[in-house]
Image (cartoon, rainbow, N blue to C red):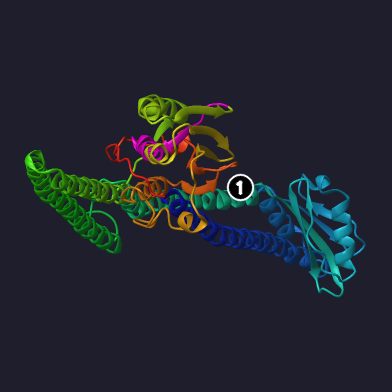
Amino acid sequence: MTRRIAWTLLALTSVLLVLAVVPLAASMTARERVSYRDNQRAATRVIAAAAEEHLSDHKPATAMRQELGTAARAGDCAAVYDASARLVAGTPCTAAQGEEAAELVGKVLAGHEPEPPENEGRLLVAEPAGEVRRPAGAVVLARSAAPLDARIAAIWGWSAAIGAAGLAASVLLSVRLARWVGRPLSTLDASARRLGEGALDERTDVSGGPPEVRRLAATFNTMAARTEALVHGHRAMIADVSHQLRTPLAALRLRLDVLAADAEEGTATELAAAQDEIARLSRLVDGLLAVARAEQATPRPTAVRVDEVVAERVAAWSPVAEERGVQLSAGSAGPAVTVALGAGHLEQILDNLIANAVEAVPAGGSLTLDDRAAGERARVLVRDDGPGMTAEAKSVAFHRFGNPEARGSGLGLAIVHRLVTANGGTARLEDTPGGGLTVVLDLPLWRERGHARGVTSRSLPVDRTADRNR
């Protein structure tokens, strides 16, 4: 933004300087030319008046020769011609006037007023001696154009200097103004980005910039403080509720264990069923806590190698799968891909999906994890040959408690969906060819240039919730 403001102001100032300085310099140049010509014409008319007295009144040529001498000392070349265009008198450099002087004399003697030409850096002016209609002769004066050129060069030089000084001042003022306006906004933008990434204690500076920007920064700080208070309060409430629920549930389970030890067979069966309900309630509390944590996730992306995480999770879950008679394997199509996810999120996603599949797939079934590149995304497939899901169940599978047929708490896929979408990915359910369910995860690829700045590993701790939401 600072550069855009500076360049905009600089371009505007440059245009204004060009529109102001160039016409002014052109006007002064034209005025200088006219003044120089008028001065030359005045000198020529003085000689013409003295020549008229000699040619018309037949007075002595003394006055005329004096004026020619004055012109010669001034560096001019002057010549006096009679009515027959014959040279009467002139300065020593008269021969340098050339043919153009003869043409001017002819036009003046014919009663015309010719346009003064320029010949090899000398300006020629012709004036009639006597009446314009019937002149007694003509005077031609040639003057060097060097003084005029020097004055014009000085005009344009000073104009250029003034324009350059104005442009330099404009650069300084533009940069200062752009920084004064842009730097607080850049700081505010960086603070907003860090706040969005989860740094709830982020605050921005409110001391710089225009009043409107300072008010915006103060409003941002107020909003950030309220957000931090709300999130911390929500987290504290979840922790307190979880603790308060877990404690009585554990105490109740211990009491049921004590009662079941001395109870009769019928009563022991009822107590075992009650213990199962308490265990399910404990898992439900843990699942709700995991969902709440997932919904608060504000990940900062890190580079995650999908094939390494898949191999690690397959190795970790293989003993559980073997115990249940499920064949768990990993496959990869194409080169290894790296995705941009919060630290630990892919592990938590795969743990929930593998736990769900291991619970649902009957003994002798298989579960395969594949990863591959798919255009601008990385695709992870969790494919099983279990009973699958109906179309109605798939449409609500990612909702909390969405599937009434879920064997667990119905929160596992909701956690997966929340973690995937929080990282900019998508998740969907498809039927496996031949029977079963396939979970398709499209995850954003890691772009080193896009994520190289300010990357930290802040995310949720890995939650090993084993929950079947189908």
Residue 303 drawn at (x, y percent): 41, 32
Residue at (77% x, 61% y) in the render: 60
| Residue 204 higher or lower than 341, as above or below | below
Please name the residue that numbered disc 1 is placed on. Answer: 150
Tell which of 152 and 376 is nearer to you.
376
Residue at (59% x, 51% y) in the render: 151
Stretch in magenta = 335-354
Could you classify mark 1 by the number of other residues whose Cα lies within 10 Å: few (under 14), some (14-19), or many (20 or more)?
few
Residue 351 drawn at (x, y percent): 36, 36
Tell which of 199 and 260 is nearer to you.
260
The type of residue carrying mark 1 is Ala
141 displayed left or right of 202: right
Tell which of 69 and 18 is nearer to you.
18
Residue at (81% x, 53% y) in the render: 89
Q: Quadrant of residue 256?
A: top left
Q: Quadrant of residue 335?
A: top right
Residue 173 drawn at (x, y percent): 38, 53
Asked if residue 344 is among those painted magenta in the image, a careful observer would answer: yes
133 displayed left or right of 276: right
